[in-house]
Every structure is written in C-alpha cells, then in structure tokens.
Image (cartoon, grey):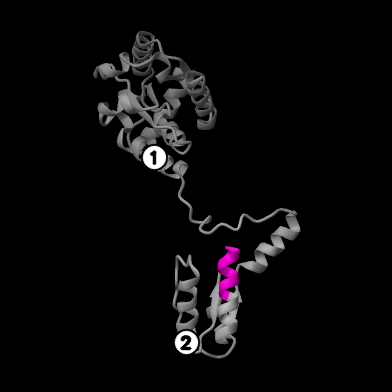
C-alpha cells in the first residue's frame, strides 16, 4: 500500500522499515522518535486499543503523520456484520494445535505409504489394507488432511503382510475391496498410461480374482471392517473411516 501511494508522486523510491512484535508503549515511543528524525510516515496495523492510543498520542506529540491501515476495514466489517472485533494481535498468523496435527498426519501418511515401514502401523490412527489400485494412498492423504494418521499396507499373495496388523484392535484396521471387473478396467488403464501392454498378468482377471481372494482371507483373519470402494469417491470412503474412528473413541 505504501509503494502504491508513493507511485502517485512520480517517485520510484521508498525506504520501508518493518517493525514487528510491537507490544509495549516504550517501544512505540522509540519508533515514533526514529520516524520523526527521518521525516517518515508510520503506517500501522496495531489493533490492541491501549497500544493504538499510545501510538496516536505519541505521534501527535512528535508531529509524525500516521496512517491506520487495518482500522477502517475492521470498522467497515463491524458495521456490516453487527459483530464486535476480537482486537487480538497475531490472529492471522496463529499456528494452533490443529495445524501442527494436520502437518504431522500428512508427514505420517507419506512416510508410511504403501508399506514402506511397518513400524508405523502401531502408531497409526487407522491402517488401510487392500490390493493394488483400491485408492489406499489417496484415502490416506485425504484422512491426513483431516488430521488422521493413516498408514496403508498393500496385500499381495507373494508377500506376507506385517504381523502387526493381526495384533491391532479390529476397528483400527480397515480393508478395502472392489469389484473384480472394475479393478480389471482400472489396472488396464494404468498399464496404458505407463505405456505397457494391457495384457500383462497384473491386469488379468485371473490374477485379480486371486489377489482379491487372498486379501479377503487376510481381512477375515484380522476381523477388520471392509469397505467396497467400487464406484465410490475417496470422500465417501473417508467418511466411513471417520465414522468408524469416532465410534471407537466413543
């Protein structure tokens, strides 16, 4: 805003000094005195009434012009909404516990994606298991943005799943299944995207049926709830997972 104002006076130069964390009248007096020495203008966004009054008073005494940048907008919103502003400093940049919890959950989902490290299973809020292309990773990332730490384990007949999934509470593990014909289409499209032949074993219906049977046996062994993700958006599946978690916490 200061630069835009200066441009109206055919000058491309402005020396801006930013002073953050102004929280006491003594500091304000020092700032006003410094501005007075260089014939400066003070533009401020102070919202705390006592500090604002101290600035106005000191500026008048020193003869330093001041501009309230934030005040008129707050007044306009108060008039429009009929509400009362909180008048608390730093609300825009406040990093609360929810923010850090979400960041932690996202980092967790990335670190323990696709069975990279089974050690994360015991620290997860929920562990997603299922065959390839059942949207395990997108689901975990969606849950992470809801501050839920989710790990996922791919179920492949040739690779035994981590023993940890059999020791967890039943409602802490969630299985994903899908109609074989739909999974066949998804995998064939995946192969085409990668420039591979659609007839590869990975996308054959026989292989898919074998994987789904194996995954079903693992899910039955864990006793976990199972969600059919056929033609379901990630959001729909996530809502079921969140419901299961809330039921567990109750």
**Left or right of 48 in this view: 221:** left
Name the residue at 31% across, 13% down.
Answer: 166
Residue toward you, 152 or 28: 28
Q: Main secondary structure of the magenta part?
A: helix
Numbered circle sitting on residue 106: 1
Cβ atoms under marks 2 and 1 closer than 8 Å: no
**In the image, is residue 180 above or below residue 235?**
above
**In the image, is residue 10 above or below residue 136?**
below
Name the residue at 58% across, 66% down.
Answer: 50
Q: In the figure, residue 223 lies in which quadrant?
A: top left
Q: Is residue 227 visible?
A: yes
Residue 38 magenta: no
Name the residue at 32% across, 35% down.
Answer: 196
Local packing at callout 2 (Cα closer than 10 Å; few below 14, some 14-19, many 20+) is few
Q: Is residue 46 visible?
A: no
Numbered circle sitting on residue 13: 2
Residue 124 at x, y = what percent?
36, 27
Query: Which quadrant is home to the N terminus?
Result: bottom right
Exactly how many numbered labels are in the figure? 2
Q: In the figure, residue 21 lies in which quadrant?
A: bottom left
Write the start and end of the magenta stretch as one range: 46-55
Asked which secondary structure carries label 2, the reply is loop
Residue 15 at x, y = what percent?
45, 83
**In the image, is residue 147 above or below residue 54?**
above
Residue toward you, 163 or 247: 247
Residue 88 at x, y = what percent?
56, 57
Residue toward you, 132 or 35: 35
Asked which secondary structure carries label 1, the reply is helix
* Cα distance between the residues tagged 2 and 1: 44 Å
């Amino acid at each position: 805003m200061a630069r835009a104002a200066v441009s109206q006076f055919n000058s491309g130069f402005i020396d801006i000094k930013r002073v953050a964390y102004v929280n006491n009248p003594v500091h304000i007096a020092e700032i006003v005195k410094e501005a007075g020495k260089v014939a400066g203008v003070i533009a401020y966004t102070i919202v705390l009434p006592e500090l604002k009054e101290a600035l106005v008073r000191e500026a008048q005494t020193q003869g330093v012009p001041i501009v309230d940048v934030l005040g008129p907008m707050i007044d306009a919103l108060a008039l429009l909404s009929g509400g009362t502003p909180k008048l608390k400093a730093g609300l825009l940049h406040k990093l609360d516990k929810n923010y850090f919890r979400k960041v932690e959950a996202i980092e967790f989902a990335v670190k323990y994606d696709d069975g990279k490290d089974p050690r994360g299973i015991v620290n997860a809020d929920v562990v997603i298991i299922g065959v390839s292309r059942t949207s395990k990773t997108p689901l975990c990332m969606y849950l992470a943005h809801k501050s839920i730490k989710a790990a996922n384990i791919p179920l492949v007949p040739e690779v035994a799943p981590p023993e940890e999934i059999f020791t967890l509470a039943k409602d802490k593990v969630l299985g994903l299944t899908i109609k074989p014909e739909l999974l066949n289409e998804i995998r064939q499209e995946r192969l085409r995207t990668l420039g591979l032949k659609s007839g590869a074993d990975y996308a054959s219906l026989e292989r898919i049926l074998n994987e789904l049977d194996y995954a079903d046996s693992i899910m039955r062994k864990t006793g976990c709830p199972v969600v059919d993700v056929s033609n379901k958006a990630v959001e729909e599946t996530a809502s079921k997972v969140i419901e299961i978690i809330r039921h567990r916490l109750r």
